[in-house]
Image (cartoon, rainbow, N blue to C red):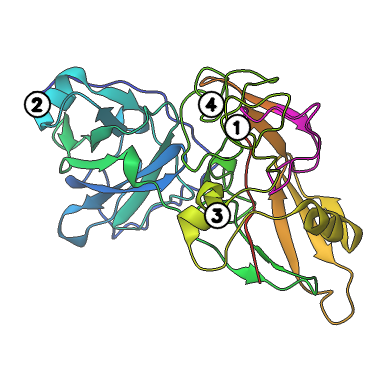
């Protein structure tokens, strides 16, 4: 028997229904399938499925929740290697009850390395065999995180606003915020990264410069360009989404604020609903004001979302090297 993997799972409330007399009691033989990895920067949501043999019905008599989950590694790519050295994660699920033949679970892997290939496998404890069973080994690369535009929401303003932050893949405020935050970017950079500081910033080495681009006579490294508006090649929204998508201007942020009712939804989100005649049924959700200054920490700085725009709000207090969200706009 392969070595047992003991985990503590996050278990929401569930309903255990009483079996009728004509149904099979006790554990049934099960199989495990390794599901997809849903990538939302910088997190993977990994799925697994447990199925009962021959369409029989699962129950907690068949599944041990403390020995079910995901093994993942950036070093191993075989089942034996993952069993020996993979990092185990417990499982979460939305709903489970008796009298179903399949059960889908998942977990969020949040401590990923950047530009790295990972292999992973789902596992579960089969009570009928008294052993751990495994699905197929699958893999993903953190270079493949998705950048999709989301819906272009017409709030009756001068531009349409994306329903998603740049790098987010879905929007449901009942889900974990990892699904919806999106990527962090330093101002003028078009790729997310691990560390957001002056040692890693593309155009300069300190708050006061010198800067190789977007500079003036007082802080230029070499050539003075006096640029304060991002060129298209330095606009992350334009680079990642193409078309007419871009970062918003300061005036467009002000227009959104003055023409929408901003209300708190929950711990992670605000809702901006249009006040413009004919558009009062239109709205967008905004993650609250987080930014990233190191590889380890998120820092919350307020209730409303704080995001990059074409023109920085002040060259005096503006930290270009920090990582902020981007909410794209389009004509």
- Tell me what residue is drawn at x 55 percent, y 63 percent: 150
Q: Earlier in the sequence, mark 1 or mark 2?
A: 2
Cβ atoms at labels 1 and 3 below 8 Å apart: no
Picture mark count? 4
Q: Earlier in the sequence, mark 1 or mark 4?
A: 4
Cβ atoms at labels 2 and 4 below 8 Å apart: no
Cα separation between marks 1 and 2: 39 Å
Question: Does 76 sit above or below residue 156?
Answer: above
Instruction: State the image coordinates of residue 43 (x, y, percent, origin top left).
Output: 44, 37
Residue beneath disc 4: 201
Residue beneath disc 3: 232
- Tell me what residue is drawn at x 22 percent, y 57 percent: 56
**157 or 142, which is in the foreground?**
157
Which element carries disc 3, helix, strand or loop? helix
Question: Does 303 sit above or below residue 154?
Answer: above
The label shown at residue 80 is 2
Which element carries disc 2, helix, strand or loop? helix
- Tell me what residue is drawn at x 26 percent, y 42 percent: 140
Cβ atoms at labels 1 and 2 below 8 Å apart: no
Q: Nearer the viewer, mark 1 or mark 2?
A: 1
Residue beneath disc 1: 323
Which range of residues does the magenta coloring cover?
300-323
- The question of residue 125 being in magenta is answered with no
Question: Does 90 sit above or below residue 233?
Answer: above
Q: Earlier in the sequence, mark 4 or mark 3?
A: 4
Q: Report the side of 209 relative to 2 (left or right).
A: right
Cα separation between marks 3 and 2: 48 Å
Q: Nearer the viewer, mark 1 or mark 3?
A: 3
Instruction: State the image coordinates of residue 50 (x, y, percent, origin top left).
Output: 27, 48
Q: Earlier in the sequence, mark 3 or mark 2?
A: 2
Cα separation between marks 1 and 3: 19 Å
Write down the quadrant of residue 198 in the picture.
top right
């Amino acid at each position: 028997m392969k070595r047992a993997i003991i985990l503590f799972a996050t278990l929401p409330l569930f309903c255990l229904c009483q079996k009728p007399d004509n149904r099979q009691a006790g554990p049934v033989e099960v199989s495990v399938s390794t599901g997809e990895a849903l990538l939302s920067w910088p997190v993977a949501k990994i799925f697994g499925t447990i199925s009962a043999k021959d369409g029989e019905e699962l129950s907690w008599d068949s599944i041990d929740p403390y020995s079910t989950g995901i093994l993942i590694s950036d070093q191993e790519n075989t089942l034996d290697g993952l069993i020996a050295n993979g990092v185990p994660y417990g499982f979460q699920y939305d709903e489970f009850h008796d009298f179903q033949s399949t059960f889908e679970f998942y977990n969020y892997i949040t401590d990923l390395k950047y530009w790295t290939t990972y292999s992973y496998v789902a596992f579960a404890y089969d009570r009928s065999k008294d052993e751990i069973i495994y699905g197929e080994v699958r893999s993903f690369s953190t270079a493949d995180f998705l950048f999709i535009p989301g819906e272009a929401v017409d709030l009756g303003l001068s531009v349409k606003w994306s329903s998603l932050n740049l790098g987010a893949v879905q929007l449901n405020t009942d889900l974990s915020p990892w699904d919806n935050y999106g990527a962090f970017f330093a101002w003028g950079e078009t790729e997310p990264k691990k560390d957001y500081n002056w040692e890693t910033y593309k155009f300069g080495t300190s708050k006061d410069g010198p800067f190789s681009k977007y500079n003036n006579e007082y802080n230029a490294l070499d050539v003075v360009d006096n640029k304060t508006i991002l060129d298209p090649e330095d606009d992350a929204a334009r680079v990642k989404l193409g078309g007419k998508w871009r970062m918003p201007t300061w005036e467009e942020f002000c227009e959104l604020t003055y023409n929408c009712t901003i209300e708190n939804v929950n711990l992670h989100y605000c809702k901006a609903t249009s006040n413009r005649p004919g558009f009062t049924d239109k709205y967008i959700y905004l993650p609250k004001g987080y930014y990233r200054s190191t590889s380890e920490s998120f820092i919350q700085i307020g209730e409303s979302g704080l995001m990059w725009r074409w023109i920085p709000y002040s060259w005096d207090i503006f930290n270009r090297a920090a990582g902020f969200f981007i909410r794209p706009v389009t004509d």
